[in-house]
Image (cartoon, rainbow, N blue to C red):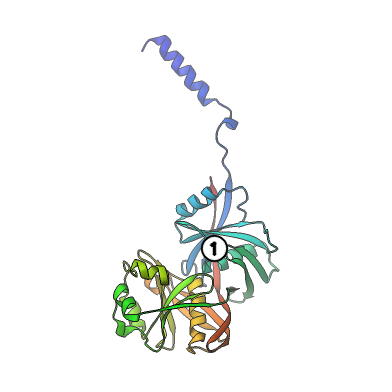
Amino acid sequence: MKRRDFLATAIAGAAAASLPAAAKPARKTFDFVQVDVFTQTPLGGNPLAAFPDARGMSDAQMQNITRELNHSETTFILPATAGGDAKVRIFGGEGEIPFSGHPTLGTAFVMALTRPGKTAMVLEEGVGPIAVTLERRADGLFAEMTQTEPVFGPKADPKMVADALGFSVDEIDSRYPVQSVSTGAVRLIIPLKSASTLAKLTLGHQLPPDQRAIFSNSDYFVVTGEDQIEARFLGFSSEDPATGSAGGCAAAYLIQYGIRKPDERIAIHQGRFVNRPSIVYVRTSGATGKPTNVRVGGYVVEAMRGKFTV
């Protein structure tokens, strides 16, 4: 390269580098709070990142941030549009979700950080308004949500379910049906005789496609044959440590079939198989065969705070 060509190239590069900042794409920083839901101990329960002020954030940014953080869900808090306390958008790795349990309670906890006297709030979610109560106890903050009224769906063939999901049909508690239930999200409730079956379950199983279309692809294994209620929520490639939406379905199911009494506060233990022990507290009013007013609650603890620049 000739000397004059070299100088021309250098001058052009220096000019490009000195362009005013306004010519570069603007970036914005958003605060977030990470909490653990359904636990009193950090690093237990189900983690959630919540953005207290997501104004100005695009849908694509919300989705990309969710994938970057790599939790099952992330929430974005916006001003209310329908008379509630806030509009809450819930994103999972594959897209926006109309409702999910631990994101609802975790978001309410984060909102309560700036509302110290608040004991109740309404979150506007994709399924509609979700009411949450907050109780500041000596051992931590307890949040409880009221889910939508239970809808009982079709009953599945126990053998088909057991064969597809990798265990023996004899391990299903045959006193009760394998049935889909929704209290905001559809879950297939699979009653088990013993917690020993929970330990045998493995990832990589799912119902046949035609059955998933009927019963959903969300299987909640609930021990109904022992005094303590323990559960697992397994997908094809991952396990959820604590599942508020499925807990609500299980609560309605337990009252529907007389396994527990109306308005009894039931502790559903979950998460020990992924080293994140959790307790989902549920209760349902009504009567056997007529459950109503499903409530799901748990403790929430703060784990960390941070900033995200996009």
- Residue 260 position, x and y percent, is 50, 88
From the viewer's perspective, is residue 192 above or below residue 219? Answer: below
Q: Nearer the viewer, residue 201 or 82?
A: 82
- Residue 186 position, x and y percent, is 48, 71
Q: In the image, what residue type sits under mark 1? A: Pro
| Mark 1: few/some/many CA within 10 Å (<14, 14-19, 20+) | some
The answer to whether residue 122 shows anywhere in this view is yes
Q: Residue at x 58, y 44 (%)?
A: 28
SS class, disc 1: loop
Q: Residue at x 44, y 83 (%)?
A: 229
From the viewer's perspective, is residue 44 above or below residue 30? Answer: below
- Residue 78 position, x and y percent, is 63, 56
Q: Nearer the viewer, residue 207 or 172?
A: 207
- Residue 288 position, x and y percent, is 53, 89
Residue beneath label 1, please? 98
From the viewer's perspective, is residue 70 above or below residue 45? Answer: above
Q: Nearer the viewer, residue 217 or 24?
A: 217
The answer to whether residue 217 shows anywhere in this view is no
Picture quarter with the N terminus: top left
